[in-house]
Each structure stands twice: as structure tokens, then as C-alpha cells.
Amino acid sequence: MSSLPLSPADGGGRYPGFRTLDQSPHWDAATTEVVLARVEHPPGIRFFAAREQALAQALFDLLLAQTGEPRVPVLELVDARLADGETDGWHYDGMDPDPQAWRATLAALDDEARAGSGSGFVEADADAQRAILQRVQAGGQDDWHGYPASHVWSLWTRYACTAFYSHPWAWDEIGFPGPAYPRGYKNLGVDRPEPFEVPDAHPAEDPVSRGARS
Amino acid sequence: MTSVRDRNESAWLLPPHPGQNHQLRADMRRFADDDEIDIAIVGCGAGGSTLVQRLARRGWRAVAFDAGPFWDPERDWVSDEAGSHHLYWTEPRVIAGDDPVPLGSNNSGRGVGGSMVHYAGYTPRFHPSDFRTHTADGVGADWPLSYSDLKPFYEDIEAELPVAGEPWPWGDPHSYPHRPHPVSGNGELFLRGARACGITAKVGPVAIANGRFGNRPHCIYRGFCLQGCKVNAKASPLITHIPDALAHGAEVRADSMVSRIGFDERTGRATGVHYLRNGTEHFQRARMVAVAGYSIETPRLLLNSRSARFPDGMCNDFDQVGRYLMVQGAPQTAGRFDAEVRMFKAPPPEVSTEDFYETDPTKPYKRGFSIQTVSPLPITWAEHVAAQGHWGTDLRRYMSDYPHWACLGALCEFLPLEGNRVTLAEETDRHGLPVARFSYSQCDNDRQLMDAAQGVMERILRAAGADEVITIKRFAHLVGGARMAADERHGVVDRNCRSFAVPNLLITDGSVLPTQGSANPALTIMAVAARAAASLANREEE
Ligand SMILES: Cc1cc2nc3c(=O)[nH]c(=O)nc-3n(C[C@H](O)[C@H](O)[C@H](O)COP(=O)(O)OP(=O)(O)OC[C@H]3O[C@@H](n4cnc5c(N)ncnc54)[C@H](O)[C@@H]3O)c2cc1C
Ligand code: SF4
């Protein structure tokens, strides 16, 4: 396993050599089973139909900037939740329950792309794809193919972020050590890493304000 | 005063290591459906578990039903955010209104222990003013109870959880049974920033034992309190009240969803509960019924319990059921530091200030807010970052900065409004029962509080040295929906949690709260249930 591809300008390589999975011998059995399943056997696709799968893959790659391998299996993790009915239960009045809303909004991505450039969303170039997402994000309460745009954006980002940041490779990238039972933490306080934590190699570089300036 | 162990032996009934007392569960007393038990309690959360423990101690034949499982933390819970999804109530619900409130992971639990299985663990008391906001400030409602009526029950529950914290200077000043915990980077920065701004902040109050309590081990500062404490350090009724209830002959009937309250048209009394277990419907006979299913499910169950006498739902003669539901405005403000905070280390609940809790006559709004540390784990943090509009490489770059952020949360006292309520939706769940439709709209006062709280959090973080601050607007802690009142035209139950309409029906969860202050509600819910149990038992046993 290697780390996820992410350029240093985008926050890659800040915790050199840090691998959450190296700590897995310190995890309890129930947790180990759940977390390793995400890494070792991403589930097969059961919910999305073929075209939906391609659309969802393109959408997730954009939302999470996953451009190459290895890749956190976001598509597979979201598909499993929808196939198993593992939703948050609630939905906005006027919005369908999540599984139907997913199918409808993925189809709408295609409709929107075709109306613009004539080709489907998957086939559109990256700039055209991004422009469509930006419209949804900026849409607020406006209708987007039958749903308020903000609810669509919330649906997509909620599922995408939950899947991505549930994965140990994503934790490596953000310096998060993952499960902490039964060992716990001993060094509490500002700038007090545990022996197994890796401090940020560029603490003062503040990619945040740099990002804001660019 | 009796010792805690004499009143509630739960902590001594657990094994001397993480895990459960399997023998106690195997030996649990079991009642038959056609035994007329003394009381059927719907929901084994904060309110329901306290009630069952108190009544079992008084010799009542009690069964507490829960729609979810009887958790075994070692086996069922994980030290992982996404893997904890099953702790939440994820049956369908519809949210509506001008400011709809997302539910799921953010709001309610299922299974024995209720929402306290995954609550953070803050356990502040309400202030005396919370019980009379209408008289004092012309907003909200007055309780048919005063702070002093509840005070002895606060003290009892604080000892049973037990609560750790510094001596508390706000509201009715008091101290806590356990010393304050050491603080992490997040708590340290909050204390530093508050000091620089002249704001008083204190460590606590958290329902996490500091030191051994009975057989419960010490906290290991692992930060996964919102995923269920596998260690048994953080209090939830699963370990603080249920063991003692079982030892005193109560039954916990898990995986049993109550669908309707039985009712006798002739006597006008509740007769027991209809419930679904493994796909079949049962009816448990009972002399009394108490509903404690959380502020959404409690009104839903009443509304779904229709009869000739109650065509619009049980206890709903005056259209009060489901109304005056409240959430707290819970904006979260995070600050960026060059130093590493690593806020995920240590329990998220650490430090609070209640300096802004009371009405400030110099401000245009009434009532106030509190501020506390919150320490989101990666998924929740990603939500915070994504809410700023970041996605793609922007999001990844922001997220890579995670160890540098500290995060505070406010709890703003939103006012109880008539139109904020639960009704039944057209949609039905997998049992064919209409689901709850929860509508919420804020008033001006609510919005002003959110802005004011955000301003104070930004000030504290900047004073601590943050060079950037970001805020996400969130909501927390639903209470109300079947409130207590002086009479049946203004509420559903009386000061002892007895319904006005059905003499042998009680409601003993967060639904009965008429106001919410800016305190986290669990301690108050337990204290109200303990008080209801005492008055019920005293009256019935006379
Ligand atoms: C993320 C999060 C953090 C929180 N942090 C804090 C905090 O730090 N401090 C604090 O004080 N509060 C906190 N809370 C809120 C607190 O947990 C709740 O307010 C409290 O537990 C509510 O108590 P209750 O008795 O009303 O309901 P619950 O504790 O939710 O119990 C209700 C129970 O009833 C069961 N039930 C519902 N309907 C039925 C039915 N029809 N049949 C059978 N069973 C049923 C449910 O399964 C559930 O177990 C937090 C909540 C969340 C979600
Ligand atoms: S931090 Fe402490 S209280 Fe919280 S889950 Fe871990 S051991 Fe339990």
C-alpha cells in the first residue's frame, strides 16, 4: 500500500511515513474487523446500475479530487450503504428518500451535461464537469432538476465525505491515528504528540491561507 | 444522605474491566404478555432507564421496552466513526419548515441506553431562571416546577453518573463529586483564549468518572465518546441505571418497538402497550404506561395511538401533542493554530463557559448561550470544512491541516414556538406506521443568539492565537413536544409527568421540558424522571 496521490501544494506528504494501519495491532477485535474490511475487501456494486455507477464514479472523483490510483473506494462504500438501506433515515420534505434521490440526481447530471454540450456527464471534459457541480453548489434554494440545489449538494457531499474520511489512507493524509481503543492517548495538550504520531512536516506553511490566496 | 451504592449499585454490578455483566442479563426476570405488570415503559434512554431503576427499587413489576438492541459494548461498538452508524435512530423521518433540522447521527439514538450511548457527556444543570422565563423575560414558558423542586434530584443523579468538574459558579453555584479531568490541546486553548478576553471558563461538567467508580475503569482519553464508550468510563443508562434495575427484578425487553398504547374506552385508562418483536405483534398488559421515546418518537407514538375517545391521538384534546419542540442553535467555530492541537485526543467534552447564559439587558435579544469544547473526528470535521464551500483539492488541502485546528461549539437557547412540532407524515415505515414529520422555523431572537455566540467564539479563538476562524451552523439536542404545564390547555402532562387526559399514563423523557436553557439536557431529563418516579411511587404506595 502506498499513500494516496496528492501533490504537496494540495496538502500531500505532510506527515511523512505515518501509516495508521501500522497501529492496527493495538486495536480491539470488533474495530479491527470493521476498519480492515474497508481496506481489504471493498464490496462489489449492488445498488447502482451500470450508467449510474459511471456517473457516481465521475462525481466522487471530482468531489474528492481522486485522480489516480490508489483510490479510496468511495463509490463502493456509498453503494454498500444504499444497497443495505444504511441511510440517515431523515430526508427533507419534498425530497425523496436517499436511494431514490441518488438515482434521480445522477440521471440529472447526465441530462444537464447533454443539454449543455451534447455529451453525457461522464464523457464531458473536466472543466465542463466542474462547471456543472459549481452550478449545483451555488444554486441554494433554486430548483435543480426537481430538487432544491442545496439539498442535492448536501446529499452528495455528505455521502462522499463520510466514505472518504472513513478510510485509513485518508487518515494518513490528515495525521489522524484512527481507532484508539484499548490504548488511548497519554500526551494531552498543545504540541504533545504520542510516540506513534507523526508531527506535521510543514506546520507554519498553513496551506489554508495559501489556498485562500490562490 | 445515603451513599450512592445504597441507592444505585449499577457501577458495582459491572465487571472490573470494560464489558458487561452477562450473568445479570441471563438471570433477568421475564414477564409474560398477559401478566398485568405494574408499569410498561416505552424507551430505555435517559428518562426511561432512570424511571425503571427507581421503580424496580421500590418493588414495582416493571418492563422497559426499547426498539433497539441490548448493547454489548465490547462486541457491538467500535472505535470508529463510520462504523457507529447503527447507534443512531435511522428509521425514516421527514424534516420541514423554514429551518429544517437534520436528524440521524446528529440527534437521536436507539437501543438500551438511548441517545446517551452516543452523547458527548456534558451534564450541566439548568439555571433557576430557566424555570420561569416567561415571568422573568416575557419569552418562553414558566414550568409548573421550580429549580428547588429539582435540585435534590440533580444532586442524586450527579452522584450516580458521576459528574466531574470544577466548582461551578453559574446558576445555583454547586460543586461536583469528581475532580476535573486534565485537558487536551483544545481545552487548553479555550481556557487560554477565555482568560485573555476576561471570560470565565471552567473544566467540566462531564459524566466521565475521574478515577475508578465502583468497577468502572478510568477514562483513557481516546476521544470516541460520540461513538459509545467501550471503556465504561462515560456514563450512559446502560451502565448507570440498567444494571441496578435488573438486579431489582425489572425486565428490559429490547428489539421491541411499541406501535400503539392500549386504551379502554369504558374506563378511559391505558391498558398496556402493543409492540412489534421479530415481525409479530404482541400486547403487554400493564397497570400504568410511561412513554420515554425521545422528543420525536414520543409525540409520534401518542399521535399514532388513536381511538374513539382520542381521534387525533392520545392526550391530544387541545392540540398540544408534538408542539413546542425545541432544538438548540449549535454553531461550531474552529480556529487555526501553527501549533498542533490534535483535538481528537481526549473526550470532546472538556471545558465550558456559562457567562452568556442569562438575559443581558444591554442586548437586543432575550436569554443566552453557553460555549463548550467540541472536538469533531474526521468525518464530522469534513462536514464542517465542506460547509465552507470546499470540495475537490481545496477540501483535501484543508483537511490535511486537521491537527492544527481547535473547535468550540455554542448552545443557544432557541425559544419554544407553537408551530415547531411533530405531526404524522403520509409516508409509513417498514411496519406500516406513519412516520414523524418534524417542522422547524427560527424566530428573530434565535438568529440573533446564533450570531452573538459565533462572535464570542471567534473572539476567544483569536485571543488564543488563531489566525483563521471558520463557522458552521448546526443544531443539537431536541427537547419538548409533550410539555409539562399548569393545565391541559397549555401542555400534555402535569408537574409530576402525569398526562392530563389519561390518569395512568406518564411521559418521562425530554419531551416534557417546557424550556431548554443553554444547557445540554440529559442530566435534567434524568432528574425530572427521578422526581416523577418519587412522586408516583409515594402516591401509589400511600
Ligand atoms: C451527538 C449527540 C451528542 C449529545 N451530547 C449531549 C451532551 O453532551 N449532554 C447532554 O446532556 N445531552 C447530549 N445529547 C442529547 C441527549 O443524549 C438526549 O437529549 C437524551 O438522551 C434524550 O433522552 P430521552 O430520554 O428523551 O431519549 P433517549 O435517550 O433518546 O431514549 C429514547 C429511547 O427510546 C427508544 N424508543 C423510541 N421510540 C420507541 C418505541 N416506539 N418503542 C420502543 N422504544 C422506543 C429509543 O430506541 C431510545 O433508546 C447529545 C445527543 C447527540 C445526538
Ligand atoms: S474519551 Fe474516555 S469517556 Fe470518552 S469514550 Fe474514550 S474512554 Fe470513554
Image: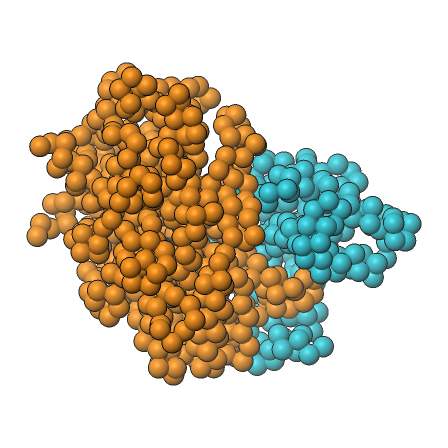
Chain colours: A cyan, B orange
Camera sees residue B70: no
User: In x, y percent, where is residue B39?
Assistant: 24, 28
Residue at 33% in and 53% down: B141
User: In x, y percent, where is residue B304?
Assistant: 44, 29
User: In x, y percent, where is residue A45?
Assistant: 69, 38
User: In x, y percent, where is residue A60?
Assistant: 71, 52
In the rendered structure, the answer to whether residue B372 lies left or right of residue A61 reads: left
Residue at 12% in and 37% down: B538
Q: Quadrant of residue B541?
A: top left
Work out which quarter of the rendered image holds the C terminus of chain B and state it: top left
Query: How many circles with numbers are drawn on the protein?
Result: 0
Q: Quadrant of residue A157?
A: bottom right
Camera sees residue B264: yes
Residue at 34% in and 61% down: B138
In the image, farthest residue toward the right: A118
Q: Quadrant of residue B486?
A: top left
- Compared to residue B280, the image places residue B406 above or below, namely below
- Observer-nearest of B10 and B535: B535
- Observer-nearest of B151 and B405: B151
- Observer-nearest of B326 and B520: B326
- Compared to residue B87, the image places residue B204 above or below, namely below
- Compared to residue B8, the image places residue A184 above or below, namely below
Residue at 75% in and 36% down: A49
- Compared to residue A3, the image places residue B236 above or below, namely above
- Observer-nearest of B65 and B79: B65
